[in-house]
Protein backbone atom coordinates (compact mmCIF):
# COMPACT_ATOMS: atom_id res chain seq x y z
CA UNK A 1 0.00 0.00 0.00
CA UNK A 2 1.33 3.39 -1.00
CA UNK A 3 1.32 6.07 1.69
CA UNK A 4 1.64 9.69 0.55
CA UNK A 5 3.38 11.89 3.12
CA UNK A 6 2.84 15.50 2.18
CA UNK A 7 4.04 18.39 4.31
CA UNK A 8 2.45 21.53 2.96
CA UNK A 9 4.18 24.94 3.15
CA UNK A 10 1.83 26.10 5.91
CA UNK A 11 2.01 22.90 8.00
CA UNK A 12 3.79 23.44 11.28
CA UNK A 13 4.29 19.76 12.13
CA UNK A 14 5.65 16.89 10.11
CA UNK A 15 5.32 13.14 10.44
CA UNK A 16 8.22 11.26 11.89
CA UNK A 17 9.67 14.23 13.77
CA UNK A 18 10.77 11.99 16.66
CA UNK A 19 13.17 9.09 16.54
CA UNK A 20 11.23 5.92 15.72
CA UNK A 21 10.96 2.72 13.72
CA UNK A 22 7.93 2.54 11.45
CA UNK A 23 4.63 0.92 12.50
CA UNK A 24 5.83 -0.59 15.77
CA UNK A 25 2.22 -0.35 16.99
CA UNK A 26 1.52 -3.45 14.87
CA UNK A 27 2.13 -6.98 16.20
CA UNK A 28 4.17 -7.97 13.14
CA UNK A 29 6.79 -5.31 12.73
CA UNK A 30 7.82 -3.82 9.45
CA UNK A 31 10.92 -5.34 7.83
CA UNK A 32 11.73 -2.05 6.18
CA UNK A 33 10.43 1.03 4.48
CA UNK A 34 10.98 2.40 1.00
CA UNK A 35 10.66 6.15 0.60
CA UNK A 36 10.75 8.05 -2.69
CA UNK A 37 11.14 11.83 -2.85
CA UNK A 38 8.71 13.60 -5.19
CA UNK A 39 9.03 17.22 -4.05
CA UNK A 40 11.85 18.41 -1.79
CA UNK A 41 12.49 21.77 -0.13
CA UNK A 42 15.38 23.89 -1.43
CA UNK A 43 17.38 22.97 1.66
CA UNK A 44 16.85 20.78 4.72
CA UNK A 45 14.23 18.07 5.04
CA UNK A 46 16.86 15.40 5.60
CA UNK A 47 16.14 12.04 7.23
CA UNK A 48 18.46 10.92 10.03
CA UNK A 49 19.19 7.25 10.72
CA UNK A 50 20.68 5.75 13.89
CA UNK A 51 22.27 2.31 14.10
CA UNK A 52 20.45 0.26 16.76
CA UNK A 53 22.91 -2.65 16.66
CA UNK A 54 25.57 -0.31 17.95
CA UNK A 55 23.14 1.27 20.42
CA UNK A 56 22.81 -2.18 22.00
CA UNK A 57 26.41 -3.30 21.64
CA UNK A 58 27.78 -0.17 23.35
CA UNK A 59 25.77 -0.83 26.52
CA UNK A 60 27.44 -2.43 29.52
CA UNK A 61 27.01 -6.17 30.12
CA UNK A 62 24.95 -5.35 33.21
CA UNK A 63 22.55 -3.15 31.28
CA UNK A 64 22.26 -5.73 28.50
CA UNK A 65 21.32 -8.37 31.07
CA UNK A 66 18.74 -6.09 32.63
CA UNK A 67 17.11 -5.39 29.27
CA UNK A 68 16.89 -9.06 28.29
CA UNK A 69 13.31 -10.19 28.65
CA UNK A 70 11.96 -6.64 29.04
CA UNK A 71 9.09 -5.78 26.75
CA UNK A 72 7.74 -2.36 25.85
CA UNK A 73 4.34 -1.11 24.79
CA UNK A 74 4.26 0.68 21.43
CA UNK A 75 1.36 2.77 20.21
CA UNK A 76 0.50 5.10 17.35
CA UNK A 77 -0.42 7.80 19.89
CA UNK A 78 2.28 10.19 18.73
CA UNK A 79 1.00 10.02 15.16
CA UNK A 80 -2.51 10.75 16.38
CA UNK A 81 -1.32 13.73 18.38
CA UNK A 82 0.57 15.06 15.34
CA UNK A 83 -2.63 14.77 13.32
CA UNK A 84 -4.69 16.40 16.06
CA UNK A 85 -2.31 19.36 16.05
CA UNK A 86 -2.97 20.06 12.40
CA UNK A 87 -0.51 18.12 10.25
CA UNK A 88 -1.80 17.16 6.81
CA UNK A 89 -3.05 13.55 7.07
CA UNK A 90 -1.13 11.05 4.96
CA UNK A 91 -3.04 9.75 1.95
CA UNK A 92 -3.25 6.11 0.99
CA UNK A 93 -4.64 4.68 4.16
CA UNK A 94 -8.20 4.35 5.31
CA UNK A 95 -7.06 5.79 8.60
CA UNK A 96 -6.46 9.20 7.05
CA UNK A 97 -10.08 9.80 6.26
CA UNK A 98 -11.92 7.59 8.71
CA UNK A 99 -10.00 8.70 11.75
CA UNK A 100 -7.38 6.55 13.38
CA UNK A 101 -8.00 4.85 16.65
CA UNK A 102 -5.14 4.19 18.99
CA UNK A 103 -3.42 0.82 18.55
CA UNK A 104 -0.91 -0.94 20.76
CA UNK A 105 1.54 -3.79 20.47
CA UNK A 106 4.22 -5.06 22.81
CA UNK A 107 7.70 -5.94 21.58
CA UNK A 108 10.97 -7.02 23.19
CA UNK A 109 13.24 -4.08 23.97
CA UNK A 110 16.15 -6.12 22.60
CA UNK A 111 15.43 -8.07 19.50
CA UNK A 112 17.56 -10.50 17.52
CA UNK A 113 17.60 -9.62 13.84
CA UNK A 114 16.27 -12.69 11.97
CA UNK A 115 18.83 -12.43 9.16
CA UNK A 116 22.02 -11.17 10.78
CA UNK A 117 21.56 -12.75 14.22
CA UNK A 118 22.73 -9.49 15.81
CA UNK A 119 20.82 -7.90 18.65
CA UNK A 120 19.36 -4.43 18.30
CA UNK A 121 17.47 -2.04 20.56
CA UNK A 122 13.88 -1.16 19.80
CA UNK A 123 12.92 2.16 21.37
CA UNK A 124 10.19 4.68 20.53
CA UNK A 125 7.87 3.69 23.30
CA UNK A 126 6.27 5.36 26.28
CA UNK A 127 6.49 2.59 28.81
CA UNK A 128 7.63 -0.91 29.58
CA UNK A 129 5.12 -3.71 29.81
CA UNK A 130 3.51 -3.98 33.27
CA UNK A 131 4.99 -0.62 34.30
CA UNK A 132 3.55 2.89 34.36
CA UNK A 133 4.81 5.71 32.16
CA UNK A 134 6.24 7.41 35.23
CA UNK A 135 8.10 4.29 36.30
CA UNK A 136 9.42 3.70 32.79
CA UNK A 137 10.67 7.20 32.06
CA UNK A 138 14.07 7.25 33.82
CA UNK A 139 15.39 4.18 32.01
CA UNK A 140 13.67 5.14 28.76
CA UNK A 141 15.26 8.57 28.81
CA UNK A 142 18.69 7.00 29.23
CA UNK A 143 18.08 4.53 26.40
CA UNK A 144 16.70 7.23 24.09
CA UNK A 145 19.76 9.32 24.64
CA UNK A 146 22.12 6.40 24.10
CA UNK A 147 20.33 5.05 21.04
CA UNK A 148 20.32 8.36 19.16
CA UNK A 149 23.83 9.61 19.81
CA UNK A 150 25.45 11.41 16.88
CA UNK A 151 28.13 8.69 16.70
CA UNK A 152 25.42 6.21 15.72
CA UNK A 153 23.72 8.42 13.17
CA UNK A 154 23.95 9.50 9.58
CA UNK A 155 21.74 11.79 7.54
CA UNK A 156 20.23 11.31 4.13
CA UNK A 157 19.92 14.32 1.84
CA UNK A 158 16.98 14.01 -0.53
CA UNK A 159 16.82 15.03 -4.15
CA UNK A 160 13.78 14.59 -6.37
CA UNK A 161 13.75 10.93 -7.31
CA UNK A 162 15.96 9.77 -4.43
CA UNK A 163 14.97 6.40 -3.00
CA UNK A 164 15.87 5.17 0.49
CA UNK A 165 15.25 1.60 1.62
CA UNK A 166 16.00 1.01 5.29
CA UNK A 167 15.72 -1.83 7.74
CA UNK A 168 13.29 -0.99 10.55
CA UNK A 169 14.67 -3.87 12.62
CA UNK A 170 18.12 -2.40 13.02
CA UNK A 171 17.76 1.37 12.84
CA UNK A 172 15.65 4.28 14.00
CA UNK A 173 15.00 7.31 11.89
CA UNK A 174 13.74 10.87 12.19
CA UNK A 175 12.49 13.39 9.62
CA UNK A 176 13.87 16.88 10.17
CA UNK A 177 11.33 19.69 10.25
CA UNK A 178 13.57 22.56 9.16
CA UNK A 179 12.03 23.91 5.96
CA UNK A 180 9.15 26.22 6.94
CA UNK A 181 7.23 27.64 4.00
CA UNK A 182 8.18 24.83 1.64
CA UNK A 183 6.56 21.60 0.56
CA UNK A 184 8.00 18.11 0.94
CA UNK A 185 6.15 15.27 -0.75
CA UNK A 186 7.20 11.65 -0.30
CA UNK A 187 5.76 8.27 -1.27
CA UNK A 188 6.27 5.43 1.20
CA UNK A 189 5.83 1.69 0.99
CA UNK A 190 6.19 -0.64 3.97
CA UNK A 191 7.70 -4.11 3.63
CA UNK A 192 6.04 -6.52 6.01
CA UNK A 193 8.29 -8.34 8.44
CA UNK A 194 8.06 -11.55 10.41
CA UNK A 195 7.20 -12.24 14.06
CA UNK A 196 10.13 -11.70 16.43
CA UNK A 197 12.85 -14.27 16.88
CA UNK A 198 13.03 -15.23 20.54
CA UNK A 199 16.25 -13.98 22.09
FE1 LIG B 1 9.07 6.89 9.82
Image (cartoon, rainbow, N blue to C red):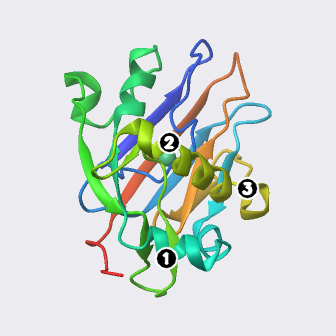
Whole-angstrom CA distance, mark 2 to mark 1, is 19 Å
Determine which of the numbered discs, if any, sits on residue 65 in the image: 1
Q: Secondary structure at mark 1?
A: helix
Q: Nearer the viewer, mark 3 or mark 2?
A: 2
Q: Nearer the viewer, mark 1 or mark 3?
A: 1
Determine which of the numbered discs, if any, sits on residue 149 in the image: 3
Whole-angstrom CA distance, mark 3 to mark 2, is 18 Å
Q: Quadrant of residue 138?
A: top right
Please state the horizontal and vertical placement of residue 185, each as a whole percent of the image. Answer: 55, 34
Q: Secondary structure at mark 2?
A: helix
Marks 3 and 2 in Cβ contact (< 8 Å): no
Q: Residue at x 68, y 50 (%)?
A: 48
Q: Secondary structure at mark 3?
A: loop
Classify the position of the C terminus by image quarter. Answer: bottom left
Q: Quadrant of residue 194?
A: bottom left
Mark 2 crowd level (few <14, some 14–19, many ≥20, 10 Å Cα): some
Reply above or below: 52 against 87: below
Total marks in image:
3
Mark 3 crowd level (few <14, some 14–19, many ≥20, 10 Å Cα): few
Whole-angstrom CA distance, mark 1 to mark 3, is 21 Å
Q: Residue at x 64, y 53 (%)?
A: 162
For marks 3 and 2 on the same chain, the one whose residue lies earlier in the sequence: 2
Please state the horizontal and vertical placement of residue 137, each as a whole percent of the image. Answer: 50, 42
For marks 1 and 3 on the same chain, the one whose residue lies earlier in the sequence: 1
- Mark 2 — residue? 137
Please state the horizontal and vertical placement of residue 102, each as a whole percent of the image. Answer: 25, 33
Residue 116 lies left or right of residue 99; in this view the side is right
Please state the horizontal and vertical placement of residue 180, each as a whole percent of the image. Answer: 71, 19
For marks 2 and 1 on the same chain, the one whose residue lies earlier in the sequence: 1
Amino acid sequence: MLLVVDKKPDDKLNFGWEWHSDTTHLEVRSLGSILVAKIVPPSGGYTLFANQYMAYEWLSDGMKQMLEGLRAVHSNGRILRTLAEGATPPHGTEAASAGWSEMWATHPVVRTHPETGRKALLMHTERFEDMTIEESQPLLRFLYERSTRPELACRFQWRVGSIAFWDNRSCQHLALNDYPGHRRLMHRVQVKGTPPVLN
